[in-house]
């Protein structure tokens, strides 16, 4: 699937909402014009009510449309923005909902660490310490930041990275904006794989909702670490 097709899917939900609104307005006006005309339909026949609970398409197609919308919504949620480091040729998923920033493990850094990461289904993902990288995204400044090393397919620029450097995500225009300089770079929209849905909290645990209120208990405190770039910490 091309990036244009993927971007189109992201906009499906908003387009359908606009269509529903226009349909309600059109039906309302049509009903007013025809109110004085004799009705040929049976009074027992169910008719669309523009002031009712559902838009025309939900009224016409019922649960079939609801199932289709749910599938499209889930598909749209899987399409995210990716950017590239110019010097290291690393691709990063930009995810403001990620707890921490991560880079893929290599054969050189396979020493297990105590930090814990979890997939969406609750499976624990191995981690291998921390590595501080100097990231060049083409925004005329470099970003020195500690990344967690983990068994994932692509790097992740999480909320900690975006907040630290005042970077803003514009998914509609496929770009990452530097809030300090107003410069921006163009990214690409791709479908993410399950291994890129990563969190520091196992949401399948019984008390996960309670732990969400105390993020300091599950999120690793790696920002205060003072190290030189490209140095591994186990």
Image: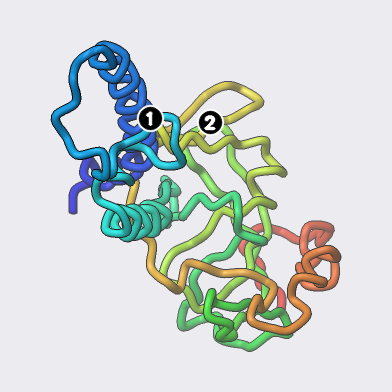
In this rendering, does residue 14 appear at all?
A: yes
Q: Nearer the viewer, residue 116 or 119?
A: 119
Q: Nearer the viewer, residue 69 or 134?
A: 69
Q: Is residue 35 left or right of residue 223?
A: left
In this rendering, does residue 8 appear at all?
A: no
Quick one: SS at disc 1? loop
Q: Where the C terminus falls, by quadrant? A: bottom right
Q: Residues within 10 Å of mark 1 (few under 14, many from 20)?
A: some
Q: Is residue 49 left or right of residue 37?
A: right
Q: Position of residue 3 (x, y in %)?
A: 24, 45
Q: CA distance from mark 2 to mark 1?
A: 42 Å
Pointer 1 residue: 50
Q: Is residue 100 left or right of residue 57?
A: right
Pointer 2 residue: 177
Which of discs 2 and 1 lies nearer the camera? The answer is 1
Work out whether 230 lies above or below 114.
Answer: above
- Quarter location, residue 200: bottom right
Work out whether 76 lies above or below 219.
Answer: above
Q: Position of residue 75 (x, y in %)?
A: 34, 57
Q: Is residue 38 left or right of residue 148?
A: left
Q: Mark 2 or 1 closer to N-term?
A: 1
Q: Nearer the viewer, residue 23 or 117?
A: 23
Quick one: SS at disc 2? strand
Q: Position of residue 187 (x, y in %)?
A: 38, 40
Residue at image position (68%, 60%) is 146
Q: Where the N terminus falls, by quadrant? A: bottom left
Residue at image position (32%, 59%) is 63
């Amino acid at each position: 699937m091309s990036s244009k097709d993927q971007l189109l899917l992201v906009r499906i939900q908003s387009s359908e909402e606009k269509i529903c609104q226009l349909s309600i307005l059109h039906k309302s006006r049509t009903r007013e014009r025809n109110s004085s005309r004799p009705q040929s339909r049976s009074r027992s026949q169910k008719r669309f009510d523009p002031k009712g609970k559902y838009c025309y398409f939900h009224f016409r197609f019922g649960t079939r449309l609801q199932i289709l919308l749910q599938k499209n919504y889930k598909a749209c949620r899987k399409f995210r923005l990716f950017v590239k480091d110019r010097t290291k040729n690393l691709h990063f998923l930009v995810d403001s909902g990620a707890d921490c920033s991560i880079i893929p493990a290599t054969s050189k850094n396979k020493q297990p660490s105590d930090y814990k990461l979890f997939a969406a289904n609750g499976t624990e993902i191995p981690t291998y310490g921390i590595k501080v990288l100097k990231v060049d995204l083409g925004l005329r400044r470099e970003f020195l930041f500690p990344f967690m090393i983990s068994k994932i397919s692509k790097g992740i620029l999480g909320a900690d990275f975006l907040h630290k450097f005042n970077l803003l995500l514009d998914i509609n225009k496929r770009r990452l904006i530097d809030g300090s300089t107003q410069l921006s770079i163009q990214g690409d929209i791709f479908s993410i794989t399950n291994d890129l849905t990563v969190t520091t909290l196992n949401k399948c645990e019984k008390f996960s909702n309670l732990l969400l209120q105390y993020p300091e208990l599950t999120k690793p405190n790696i920002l205060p670490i003072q190290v030189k770039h490209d140095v591994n910490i186990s």
